[in-house]
Every structure is written in structure tokens, then in C-alpha cells.
Image (cartoon, grey):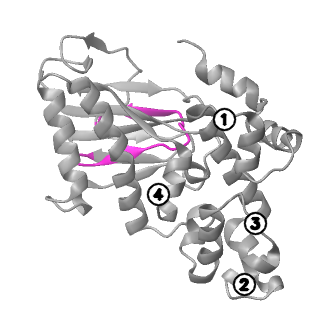
Amino acid sequence: MNSIDTLIALANVRGCLDLRCQFQGDWALEHPQEALGMAPYHIVLAGHCRVALPDGQHLRLQAGDILLLPEGSPHVLLSPGQRVAAATPRVDERAVLPVHRLGGPEVELDMLCGRFFYNRASLLFAALPAYLLIPGSALPDQGPLAALVGLLRGEADGAQAGARFLLDALSSALFTLMLRAYLASAAPGSGALALLGDKRLGRAWQAMLADPAHEWTIDSLARAAAMSRATFMRAFVRVAGVSPWVLLTQVRMERAFGLLRHSHLSLSDIAAQVGYQSQAAFSKKFKQAYGEAPGAIRRGLRAPL
């Protein structure tokens, strides 16, 4: 498992394709701030629209574009024409996906909308910008991302057995392909992803991700990076924005969250697996990261819906 795989696995990313939008005329649709751990996305199948972001930026989306908002930021989708008051769409529940409609019967904008759910303390999502715009014009027609969008559209158009399950499974895969497209077109300036782009610091960071329970020291990390202690610490903080111990603790807590969700290990066993000899020390760090004790988190994860 490479380091990007590890970060995705720690984030426990799950996709859900929620609905389809088919709009005509002048319209506006408000999207409130999502809960922590939810990142909405929009895939434009046909037509074009605008997106108003909280900082005043306006983005233009056209057919083939994909927009992801990793922080779940509030935003307003707007028609290309004049600005109008936000409206509530009509909802048609007869298709595989609920279809939200605004305006007349002719479809000027056709869009798939969904969300990614992720570990709310995810290092990966924290390293992403406020929005990722993947332009369709920059994607090869026969590339994997374009092909996956085609599969999503085909399943949404049809009414085949298992379509709902398949749409969500494909949506989960969509995140990885979007992340690949982002990393291929941009160099993250700081954080967990920027460390991986640094030849020497990346070796130390990869070692920490591969074995977060290890008793890492400045000396061992500096050796992995082939740097002196002082140079390593200065360079790491400059690129990551925090010390190695802050990131190591975050990795350990993400790993612990996954074990709480997916295993029946005792809290003391989980503490040991993420590098803590004391369950009390582990529980204290975990509560600082998630706002709740690990036992309370586990009960919440297993409570019936």
C-alpha cells in the first residue's frame, strides 16, 4: 500500500450519489454548510452554470467539469443568466435517482450531485483546498475519470437491478480518480500531500504512515530523510506547517478511529496498535482529536440507525 492509499484508507472515504438536477431558464439553488465529514460534489453532464462561493469567488462550470468542496463549504448554484432568488426544486422520485427540476420541461443543465463521507479528522481532506475544480476539457476522452462518469450516467439513466448500490460504489471510486487528477495538475503547497512531494521529507513521512505505532525519534526520522536533525525539523515544519509529532498523533488517531469502527479490539489493544502503552494516554489524545472518548465514539458508531 503506497502513502496515498494509506491516506485514503485512513480517511475511510465513502461515496453517495444523491440526486440528479435538470434545470431550465433563470434559477438559483442554495447549498448550506455540510456537516463535518461530508464533502459535496457536482458533475455537469450537459449545459453550464455558475457557482458562488463564500469568499466571493464565482466559478463557471460546463459539461464535463467536476466540482468537489472538501470542507463542505456553503455555495450557491446559479444559472448563466440574471441573478434570481433561490428556489425550491420540484422532485421526481420515479427514476433510480431523485430528479430535482427547476424551470420548464426543456433541460438546459443536467447534473449529478452527491457527497463523500470521510473521517472528520482526516489528514487527507485537511490537505485539500477549499474547492477542487476538475475541468472536463483537461481530461482525455477515453481516460478513467471520463469513463467512470459515463458509467454513473448510464446507471442513472437506466433502471437495472442493483443500480442504486452500483451508483454509490462507483461514487466511492470517483474520489480517488478526482484526487489523481488534482495531484497531476497542482502541487500542494503545504500539509500531508506536500510532504509526499518532497523527495527527502517524503521518505520520512512515508515511513511514519507505514508504521505509525513505531517509537519514532528525531534521529530516526532525520536518518530516513538523509538530513541532519536541525535541518530536518526546520524543513518538515516549513512544508507541513506543524511538527512531525503533530502529524504522527493525527495518523495514530485516524488509525484508532478506523479500528473502533471496523474491529472488536479492546481499547487497550487499540491503544497498543497505534503506539500507546497506556490506555489513559491514548484516550486523552483521542478525545482531544475527536471531542469524545473512544468508548463513546464506538457506541455511537454501532448505535442502530
Q: Amino acid at mark 2?
A: Arg
Crowd band around label 1 with a 10 angstrom C-alpha radius: few (<14), some (14–19), many (20+): few
**Cβ–Cβ below 8 Å for labels 2 and 4?**
no
Instruction: From the image, tell me which residue sits under label 1.
Output: 265
Residue 211 painted magenta: no
Residue named by callout 2: 223
Q: Measure the C-alpha gap from mark 4 to mark 1.
A: 23 Å
Task: State which tag comes first along the sequence, 3 or 2.
Answer: 2
* Pick the front one: 233 or 297: 297
The region drawn magenta spans 62-80
Q: Which residue is mark 4?
A: 5
Q: Looking at the image, which residue is at 52% across and 26% down?
A: 32
Q: Is residue 170 above or below residue 89?
A: below
Residue at (72% x, 88% y) in the render = 227
Find disc 3 in the rendering and name its residue.
244
Image x and y of residue 170, in percent = 28, 39
Residue 217: name its quadrant: bottom right
Between the C-alphas of marks 1 and 3, the distance is: 27 Å
Query: Could you say where residue 156 lies in the image, as x and y percent from the top left?
Result: 18, 28
The residues bearing labels 3 and 2 have C-alpha atoms spaced at a distance of: 14 Å
On whether residue 75 falls in the magenta region, the answer is: yes
The disc, 3 or 4, on the residue closer to the chain's N-terminal end is 4
**Which of marks 1 and 2 precedes in the sequence?**
2
Q: Residue type at mark 4: give it.
A: Asp
Mark 2 is surrounded, within 10 Å at the Cα level, by few (under 14), some (14 to 19) or many (20 or more) other residues, namely some
